[in-house]
Image (cartoon, rainbow, N blue to C red):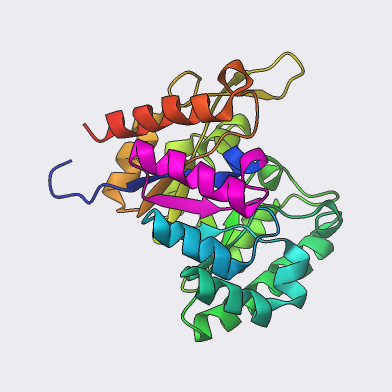
Amino acid sequence: MNGMRRPIPGIQLYTLRDHTKTAEDFDTTLGRLAALGVKDVQLSAVGPIDAAVQRKIMDKYEIRPCVTHRPFDRIRDELPALMEEHRTLGCNALGLGWAPQEQRESEQDARAFVQTLQRAADTLARHGMTLHYHNHDFEFAPLPGSDKSLMDLMLSETDPASFGFIPDVAWAHFAGLDPAAFLQMLRGRVKVVHFKDYVPGQNGRPQFVSLGQGVVDLKACYDVCCELEMPFVMYEQDDSWTNGDPFLATEESWRFLLSLQG
């Protein structure tokens, strides 16, 4: 590990989305994160709080946003406004959390979706910003009537200089991939990695757990992040928090992230 740049740990605010719906809640939540020593977050599923207000609260706690998640229709239809929001937030990386179902009904639909994202990425690049796509598990499955997956199209038909990824290691693992190998595949295209953990659920879906309590080899993923100098690792947990408390799960997972740093 000597000589390698360790990724900066942070918190994906989607985990705490029920506690960021108002400016007051956003302030309280960032205060609690700052008390843990958190300095970096991803802005996702934050309530309708003006970007300038979000920035003021982040500045109050000396917390920085490394990337966001924004809906596809806004990326497609409102890109200039999104860029202005990101300038206000002090964030140059715009993320998309997933591909809507109607964009992946066929290979043709998926190809058009990827082309739309690449056009947005080109526009962002001209303004000093980047686009990043966050995976779930469905991106790795063949598209209806095709032997190609959405991830195949994204990897082969986008420009690595402007189109990046936010790899989610738990969803990659659930899809049957080795998440550390998946990170290697994305070499040079990743600013933020989502660290997430799970155990197999009774319904055939993942049951998410705090980091280090599930089946994902997060140490192997962390070593790849260090090797490839991926800048950020963000804890994210969709649901099933310890005792139903996302703050408790965040504290547990934050301690785990820090333990990876040695």
Pick the quarter of the image with the N terminus: top left
Point out the stretch of residues depicted in magenta. Answer: 18-45
Residue 152 in the image: state x and y as whole percent. 63, 55
Pick the quarter of the image with the C terminus: top left
Q: Is residue 81 visible?
A: yes
**Residue at the image position 59 percent from the left and 67 percent from the top:** 51
* 201 sits left or right of 254 in the view: right
Residue 22 in the image: state x and y as whole percent. 66, 51
Say which quarter of the image contains residue 201: top right
Residue 158 in the image: state x and y as whole percent. 58, 69
Q: Above or below — where is 218 with respect to 166? A: above
Q: Is residue 181 visible?
A: no
Q: Above or below — where is 64 with respect to 225? A: below
Q: Is residue 254 magenta?
A: no
* 79 sits left or right of 85 in the view: right
Outermost residue, front direction?
A: 24
| Residue nearer the viewer, 140 or 145 | 140
